[in-house]
Amino acid sequence: MASLLGVLFDGLAYGMLLFLVSVGLSVTLGLMNFVNLAHGAFAMLGGYVCVVLMQRWGVPFLMALPAAFVASAAAGLILERVLYRRFYRRSHLDQVLVTIGLVFMAIAVATWMFGPQQQPLRLPGALSGQWTLLGVDLNVYRCFLLVVGALLAWTLTLVLERTRFGAAVRAAVDDARVAEALGVRVTLVFQLTFAVGCGLAGLGGALGVEVLGLDPTFPLKYIVYFLLVVAVGGTGSLKGPLFAALLLGVADVAGKYYLPQVGAFILYAIMVLLLIVRPQGLVARA
Amino acid sequence: MTSVLRTEGLSKRFGDFQVLDRVTLQLPQGARHAVIGPNGAGKTTLINLLTGTVRPTAGEVYVESERVTSLRPEQRVRRGLVRTFQVNNLFSDLTVLESVLLAACERTGAALDAWRALTTRTAEIDAARATLRLLKLEGAAQVRTRDLAYGEQRLLEIALALACKPRILLLDEPAAGVPRRESVALFEAIAGLPGDLTVLFIEHDMDLVFRFAQRITVLVAGAILTEGTPREIAGDARVKQVYLGRAA
Amino acid sequence: MRLRTGWLEVLFWSVLAAGYVLWPSQLPFASQVLIAGLFALSYDLILGYAGILSLGHAAYFGVGAYAAGLLAAHGWGEPISGLVAAGLVAGLAGLVTSPLVVRGTDLTRLMITTGLGLLLFELANRLGAITGGVDGLQGVEMQPLLGAWRFDIYGRTAYGYVLAVVFVLFLAARRLVRSPFGLSLRGIRGNPGRMRAIGCRVDLHLAAVYAFAAAYAGVAGALLSQTTQFVGLDVLSFSRSAELLVMLIVGGAGLLYGGFVGAAVFMIAHHYLSSLDPVYWQFWLGAGLVIIVLLGRDGILGFFHRRRSSAASAP
């Protein structure tokens, strides 16, 4: 029983990370129909920014997190203007090629700058250690992840549902041309959404150094997880990816805990099965 | 009189919206039948239901005496039910001849041959060229579709359908976007199609409809308002009110 | 369709046949390039001609590689029958999985093929008792080709064997793309909806070419394990699928020879750049991809093809 709760808890914390990293991908996919396989590179950037700030300049962890967000968002903003924008109307093949190219470049640059090894991260004392609650050992950092993730998901929902910007995003997801005709500046909405999505990935990457690890192959290693979140959650909404990411987190942790010999096999099998049964995602848009 | 194409109570509902309401039609062989009606009357939905790209909520479609309601689009094509599209729906990278050959090879089953060279398929090539001649497109046979003038692309729309050797040809606004002078020529080409071919067409231009249709069905809000010869339709007060009145 | 048998084609294959004289010390490497070229040709059939976007084509390469490797490791070392068997097994795998792949949009195809590829990789990884897992399959021993030529360490027999197989399969693929079926594939790539409207059973055509291409990929994989007498887990890896895409795009998709040109350029560049520094290679690979797509994704052959046709149409 205790281990079940522990697995559930770890899985949810892991799922929150996946959500943070993937939500940008799924929203931009829904918004711009753009397949960004390089999404993981923005998460990796956030991770490295966080690690470098902490190690070389002694910046505290909680200050390094927003910096990771800003750095990835800025990188996203620039790339959107310089490169991505040219490909919104091109075929998915072109999008896949360009973003795979970016993944290779990102891996090379990261290896050149930081070497191929895993990056260590020293968590502040307040966030390390365990709490024991009702006989279950709770890792403090994972509690922190859960809280941060839930807060961010809640904020994102509020922004999307209550603000003018959110309304513009929803209108653009629904039908970009109609939204444009109604006076929504779709290009700007695209740009900002893309930047925020990249920023969240960067934040997720920084938060995830402790859990997901950080080395130059990060963008390639986790492509499948991001695609899974999108495949299961559907595109263009928040609830879908959140639900999917939590489900995946729990499934992955439980799989590794209870059936270690099967490994990632179950995860891939679930992905293929889901795609067969529900090609539009579990939480399909109406 | 036996009908080649027949529908019975054909209906389609999208959510709360009744797009098509109990449409019953009968087309004898060789018919030149027009379907007219204001925008949103359900004309294109009717064609989609006839060809099977959209499933009806109720009702049946028959070709000759065979019920085809549950057949897939490509199966209906094999029964001789072929359509064209209101917006050009072509193969922009292929030449005109290649495009028509596609349809010709599908019809004869040659399309499943992965061994013999296309150039040895003389029967299909001759059939494709004959189709192009029928629509006066033979001069453009080697032109790539994307380089074709718009009016010629509209003709290629029809050529693609004709190359399937249809028994019933469904034309969804064949002259859409074509300048007046060319649209008459286009309809003359349609009028010159073999007499045993049954043609159902949607058209907005009333002059063209009254000139080329033998019978006209008026669709309003998804239901048949009336059906008759051009003379009957032209004299029908209700048609004038809901359709011609608004257009004029 | 537009390509006729030209002197360039004759030259291409003649140069390859003259490989024994032109690059006698590089025969094993040249065999690898040919195998990659065959694999890329198989991918060209589904991507370049039929327009199926896949990131999991290594699955069939790997199935073929393991099929041939396992046969040889368990005593069936006769190369040609092993090759045929591997091709059939991979083709069957393609046929069985084709219903999952051919329906759906680019995006679902992309994810399904990625998922299938990873699934197979994990399966091979977990079935270490059969596949050798991460250590690779050992004990692949080939009998002499046609009972006469031993597979020598200089790769002379292997080169001739690979070249002959690749040439025969190339001829068949060339027939396919020039046949009515090949035309229907180009029609489907351009406009699947209209193909249905003229009576084409699109899914059937796509399933057929997918299975056919899978068999080709399987033969390529089998050639690799037979000539190297080893099967590593990397035959199924995601990066093999991704590199395949790059090779074809570099060479030019939908032109039949693009896969060979792309494979050669890719592997030679890989060889030289990564001997300088592996990081260079990866960076320029990525940058090259971005540039190629920015320039309009014609690839090397497409570039010359376009120049030739524009020169021909000039007065």
Image (cartoon, rainbow, N blue to C red):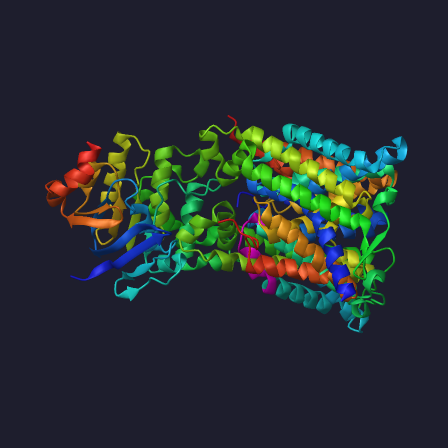
Quadrant in which the N terminus of chain B appears: bottom left
Residue B209 makes an appearance in the image: yes
- What residue is rendered at 39% in x and 60% in y? B75
Residue C304 makes an appearance in the image: no
> Would residue A113 be found to the left or right of residue C93 on screen?
right
**Where does the image place residue A97, in percent across and percent down from the top left?**
66, 41
Q: Is residue B68 inside the magenta stretch?
A: no
* Direction bottom: furthest residue: C75
Magenta residues?
A: C96-107
- What residue is rendered at 64% in x and 28% in y? A81
**Where does the image place residue B94, in percent across and percent down from the top left?**
47, 42
* Direction front: furthest residue: A134
Q: Kindly indicate the quadrant of the structure image that contains residue A267.
A: bottom right
> Would residue A236 be found to the left or right of residue B38 on screen?
right
- What residue is rendered at 59% in x and 63% in y? C95
**Where does the image place residue A20, in percent across and percent down from the top left?**
69, 44
Residue closest to the eye, C280 or A204 = A204
Residue closest to the eye, B29 or B230 = B230
**Where does the image place residue B138, in percent across and percent down from the top left?**
36, 40
Residue closest to the eye, B91 or C101 = C101
Identify the main secondary structure in magenta: helix
State whether residue B98 is above or below residue B116. Answer: above
